[in-house]
Image: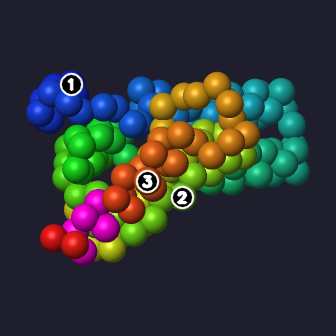
Amino acid sequence: MHNSPSAFGGDAIRLSSRLTKFVVRILPACFLALVGILIVGAAIAGRDIASLLLLLPLLGVYLLIRSEASNFADEVFDCGDSLVVRKGTVEDRIPLQDIGSVRASRFSNPERITLQLSRHCKFGREVAFIPVARWHPFARHPVARELNVRINRAIRHETRG
């Protein structure tokens, strides 16, 4: 398991946020703990079952957060002609020309960049990650914009050569 970008050849640049583990693991656990505290508090206070049922939507929100967060890759590094993606202990190198499109969410929190792949990798045909933070949230994420330019260049280069 690599702990630094230098492990990928020295020129690797981190594209994914360092807060991914917090968003994927810690935030849902804190939300579930809050729901648990509310349920226990309501039970101790002697609330009837109907008031406890009002907390069920919170459990639904937790499941939604958890399912959305489970799709994110832990780390994504730009290694020039390819991206190295890691999720848990699984790691894969994805050549730029194997990426069909790059989609970036604009109004979601956390932001998401999704790579549609033209070939299957160890993670399937789609890889999503939380990009590094930026200051201007209303424009397209610069990581997505730059990846699109480089992917188009890699595809044009491959068709010529």
Quarter in which the C terminus is drawn: bottom left
Instruction: Determine which residue is flagged by label 1.
Output: 4
**Amino acid type at image mark 1:** Ser
Tell me the tag on residue 103: 2
Answer with left or right where residue 68 lies relative to residue 82.
right
Answer with left or right where residue 100 lies relative to residue 23.
left
Q: Main secondary structure of the magenta part?
A: helix
**Amino acid type at image mark 3:** Val
Residue at image position (48%, 41%) is: 143
Q: Which residues are magenta?
A: 154-159
Q: Position of residue 44 (x, y in %)?
A: 76, 27
Q: Position of residue 107 (x, y in %)?
A: 72, 46
- Observer-side mark, 2 or 3, equals 3
Task: Let me know if residue 158 is in the magenta part.
Answer: yes
Q: Nearer the viewer, residue 108 or 23?
A: 108
Image position of 17 with respect to 49: above or below: above
Q: Residues within 10 Å of mark 2 (few under 14, many from 20)?
A: some
Total marks in image: 3
Tell me the tag on residue 149: 3
**Amino acid type at image mark 2:** Arg
Task: Let me know if residue 130 is in the magenta part.
Answer: no
Q: Secondary structure at mark 3?
A: helix
Image position of 1 with respect to 59: above or below: above
Answer with left or right where residue 27 lies relative to residue 75.
right
Q: Quadrant of residue 115?
A: bottom left
Distance of mark 2 from mark 1, alpha carbons?
26 Å
Q: Which residue is most to the front?
A: 160
Residue at image position (22%, 50%) is: 81
Disc with the residue nearer the chain's start (3 vs 1): 1
Q: Secondary structure at mark 1?
A: loop
Disc with the residue nearer the chain's start (2 vs 3): 2
